[in-house]
Image (spheres, rainbow, N blue to C red):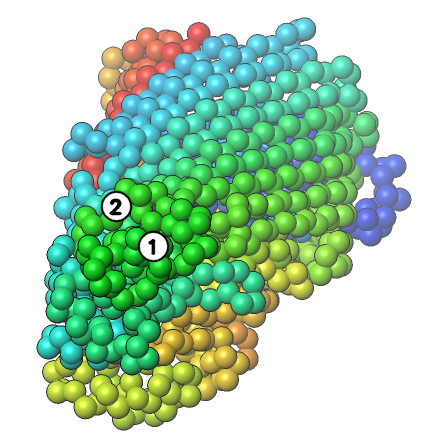
Amino acid sequence: MGAGNCFHSRARDWTVKKLSKTALLRAGVAPFIVGAMLPAAAFAQGGAADEGEATIIVTGSRIARPDLDQASPIAVVSAEQFALKGQTNVESVLNDLPQVMGSSTGTSNNPGGGIATVDLRGLGTSRTLVLVNGRRYMSYDVNQVVDLNTIPQALIERVDVVTGGRSAVYGSDAIAGVVNFVLKRDFEGIELNSTYELSSRGDGARWDINGTIGANFDDNRGNVTLSLDYYKRKAIFASKRSWSRDSFNDNQDGTFSPGGSGSIPEGRIQVPGLNAALGLPNSAIFFNPDGSPSAYDSSANAYNTNPANYLQVPQERFLISARAQYEVSSIFKPYMEAQYVNNRVDNLLAATPLGNSTPFGTGVNAGSLGAFDIQANSPYFSPELQAALNGLDTDGDGYVSVPAYGFRTLGLGGRLNQDDRSAFRIVVGAEGDLGAGWSYDGYYMYARTKNSQRQTGNVALTNFLAATRTAFQDSAGNISPFPFAGEPNGGTLVCSSADARQAGCAPANLFGTGNLSSDAAAYLGIGATNLEEYTTQVASVAFTNSSLFDLGAGGVGVALGAEWRSERGSTTPDTFLASGNVGGFNPGAPTSGGYSVREFFGEVNIPLLADTFVKRFEVNGAARFTHYSNAPGNVFTWAAGAQLEVVKGIGFRGQFQRAIRGPSVNELYLGQTVSFDGQSDPCGNAGVLGSSLEGACVANGVPQSVYDAIRALPANQQADALNNINDSNLVNPPSFQSGNANLREEKSKTFTIGAVLTPGLLPGFSATIDYYKIKITGFISPYGQGNIFAGCFDQGIQSFCDLVSRNSLGQVERIVDQNQNSGGLKTDGLDISLGYTTPLPFTIAGDEPKLSLNFNGTRVFKYDFTPVVGVPIVNECVGKFGVACSTSVPSGQPIPKWRHSLRTTLDFGKITTSVQWRYTGGVRDDDPDTIYAVEKIKAFNYFDLALAADITDNFSLTGTVSNLFDKRPPFVISQQTGGNGEQSNTLPSTYDVLGRYLSISAKLRF
C-alpha cells in the first residue's frame, strides 16, 4: 500500500490511473465560485494543459490533476496487495490498514448477517462512504451500508482510502472518509484466477474461482469487459478451537469460573420460598430427568452455548460484473456498468433460550414474557417437589407462579438464520469533451437489494405459555389442576386452556433434559421469515475543467454539478416476528420508509505560487448545498485547504472540512425491535446494601423486601443472592429500540494538517505525517443500557430511570431506548506513512532485485464519546476496551493507541517474496470500579508470508501464510456472562480468531 499522498507523483505512478485530457473525471464547483470565474473563461485556453498531458483521478476530489497531490491524507491499496495477502474477501485486506477498525467480517456470527463492512477511525460503518469508480454503490439493507462482498475483487485495480470528512465533494456519509474501489476500465484479454485457502488445522476451507474477459474494438474506441466470480467458504465451529469451545462466567472479582447461560436444557426456576421449603441452598432450582429438584449453581449448572456457534460463518457467493464503453465522438462517450450478486450466508446459535426476560409483544405495550404458571401436582415433578409447590399454592387453585426461569429447547435444534441476498446495480451514462478544456460526466444509477432471511429453531411464546400450563382430564372430558380419583395416573395430562387444546396444544415437559416429546416440540417450534428490500437511485451530472485559466502558477481547476438521490427500503417480518410472538431470534415490527435528496456541488483548486521563494503554493475549496425531503431539510457543507511545497521534496498540507451524515432509513423508520446489550445492573452489584444506591434502586422498582431478605442471609450467601438481581445467567434484559422520524443530520468538523517528504537525495523514499481532529455533534444512536444505568444511578436523572422496568424480584425486564440526536464524539490522532523502494546492488539471472518497504501507522490521542450532550457522562475509550466503550464506539471494538502494518517485499523479477507485520497495541478495561477476569489485553503481533512466482509469461502462482506463528486471540469473557468481551471468549472483529491460514492462488492470462 502506498506511503501516502506525495507532492511528486513519479515515485507513485504505479498506484494510479492515467487518462488523457479528453477523459477527465467529472467534477463540480459551487455556482457562486464558478460565477466569479466565468468572465475569465475567454482567456483560459492559453493556460490549458496540452492535449496529450496525462491527468490523474485522485479520490477525494472531482478535479483531475497532473499529479497525485491532495490536501487530505490518502492511502492506496493496489491489486498486488490483494494478491500478496492471499485473501479472497475484500474486508480482510482493508482491515490491515491502521486507520480501519474491525467491523463485520466472516467471523461475525452474533451479530452477523453475512455481510462485510469497512469502518474508518472506528466512527462506524455508516460514517464511511464506500464508492466504486467514484460513484455510490448498492446498500445491503436499510442501514445504507455497502456489503464489500458485492464488489468484484477480480476487477479491482486499486483502493483509495481518504480519511477526513468529504461530504462537500461526495455528499452524506463521508464523515470519517471515503473508500473508493477503482475497477479496471480497459481490460483486454482473458484472465482466470483460482484461490484455495485452508487453516493449518485442516478446516474452514475457502475456494474462489473467477474469470474475466475483455476486448477493445473499433480501433480501441470501445471496450467490453465481463467478469464472473464464485466463492465458497466452509464453517468452523467454536468447538474446534480450544480457547472458544467452553463458556465461562466472569465473577467480577478478578476470577472466572465455568459457566454460560442460565437458560438450561434441564430447566431452571426461581420461586420465592421454594428452595427453603425443599431444604436447598440458593434461590433457584434445576430439574433432574426424573423431575426431582436440585440447587442451581451458575458455575456448575450453566449451559455451555459456545460449541454450537460458528467461529467462521459459511458463505456461498456468485457475482457477475460487466462494463461497456464506446467513443461515438469526443463529445459523446456512452458507458454502462452492471453487477449482479447472490450471497448466501448462515448464522447459527445455540438452541432457543426462554426466560422471564424474553421479549414478548410489540408496540407501546411490548414487554417481557414475565411469569408463567406451573401445575403444583404435575406428574412431571417428583413427589417431593409437588409437596413443596402445594405448600406455596396459597390461593389453592393448583398453580404456582414462577417469576424467574430459564429453559433451553434442545429438542428443536439450534437457531439457524439463513440469509439469501440478491442484489443488482446498473449505471448508464456518458462523458465527453465539451471544448475549451471542459468535460462532463452524467449518469443514472439504479441499485436494488432483496434478502430473504429464513429462521428455524424459534419458539411461539403463546404456545410455550399454553403448553407449560397443564391440567388433568378425566374420561368424561372434565378438566382440573388436581388428580381425579379413580382415574389412572389421576387422569390424562393436557393443556389447561380449551382454546389451546383446540389448536393442537401438546403438554411440554421442559423439566429435565430429554423429556420433551416430539408432539410438544412440533407444537412449540416455528420457522420465521424476514423479507428485506432496499433501492437506491442516483442521477448526477458534473462538469470539470482542470485548467480554466492560469494565474501564473498553473491552471486553476474548477468543477460544478448537480445530483438527485433517492433512498428507500423496507423490512417485512412475518406474523410471528411482527407480533413479538417469537422466542429465539429477536422480534421486530415492520420497517418501511425513504427520502430523497437534491444537491448542487462545486470545487475549485487555485495554484497561487510556483518556483518563486517557495516551490509551490495552492489553495482549494469545495461546497455543497443539499435539500433533504425529511427532517434535515436544507444543509450546507464546505471544505477549504492548502498545500505548500517549500522546496522540492518538502511540503505541507492542511484541510478543514464541514461534513454531515443524514439519518438512514433504519434510524428513521425502524419498527420496534429488541437488542441485548448484556449490561450490568448496578442494583445487583456488591456494595449496594446499605449504600445510597440501595435507595435509588428501591425507587427504581427493586422491592425493599428483596434487599431486606438478602441482608438477613449469612454474609457468605449475600453475594449470590444479589447476583439473582443482576446475574445474566438468570436475566438478560432486553432493550426495545425504534426509529425516530424527527432525526436531524449529524454534523462534523474535521481538521487535518501534515507534511510530505520525497527527498531527492534518497530516490524511492517518501514519507507523510498527518494530524487529524474530528468532532461530531448530533450523533445518532440509542443511549445504550450502560449509559441509561449511569444516567439514572450515577447522575440521578429521572428521565433515564423511567426507561427501566423491573419485575417483582427486582430484575430488569425492559429498557426503552429510541434513536436520538443526543450524543457527541471527539477524536484526534496522527497518521504516519513511509515508503521506500530501492534496487539491490547485484543481479540474479539477469534481473535486478528490488527491496520495497511500506509502513502505515496510526496513533490515536483521544476518542471521547458523550452519550447525551449536557449530561456529564463521557466515555474515554482510547487505549481501552470493555462494557462502556463497546456501546460508545460504534463498531463496539477496542481503540488501541497505536496500530501499524509494515510490508517488506523482495522482487527478484520472476519471483517475489513478501512479509507483512501487523501490530495492534495493548488496551485496558474501561471500568475502574469493576475487577474483571481480564483487565488488560497485551499488544498483538501478527506476521504474514507470501511467495509469488511467474512460471511463464501467462501463468503465475502465489502462496501465502497468514498468522504465520499461529497466534491465539486474547481470552476475554463475553458480556452476556458478566465479562467485558464480545463473543466466543474474545473479540473476533479485532483479533485473528482462526489461527494460521494457508492459501495457494493460480492466475492464467492470455
Rounded to the nearest whole Å, what is the CA distance between mark 2 and mark 1?
A: 25 Å
Nearest the viewer among 492 and 499 is 492
Rendered location of residue 581, percent (x, y): 46, 54
10 Å crowding of disc 1: few (<14), some (14-19), many (20+): few
Tally of numbered tags: 2
Q: Residue at x 72, y 27 (%)?
A: 429
**Picture layout, residue 642 above or below residue 996:** below
Determine whether the residue tagged by mark 2 lies in a helix, strand or loop. loop
> According to the image, label 1 marks what residue?
476
Nearest the viewer among 926 and 805 is 805
Disc 2 marks a residue whose amino acid type is Ser
Is residue 521 shown to the viewer in this render?
yes
Q: Residue at x 67, y 64 (%)?
A: 742
**Picture layout, residue 839 above or below residue 283:** above
Rendered location of residue 961, percent (x, y): 23, 32
> According to the image, label 2 marks what residue?
517
Disc 1 marks a residue whose amino acid type is Ala
Q: Residue at x 41, y 59 (%)?
A: 497
Quadrant where the N terminus sits is: top left
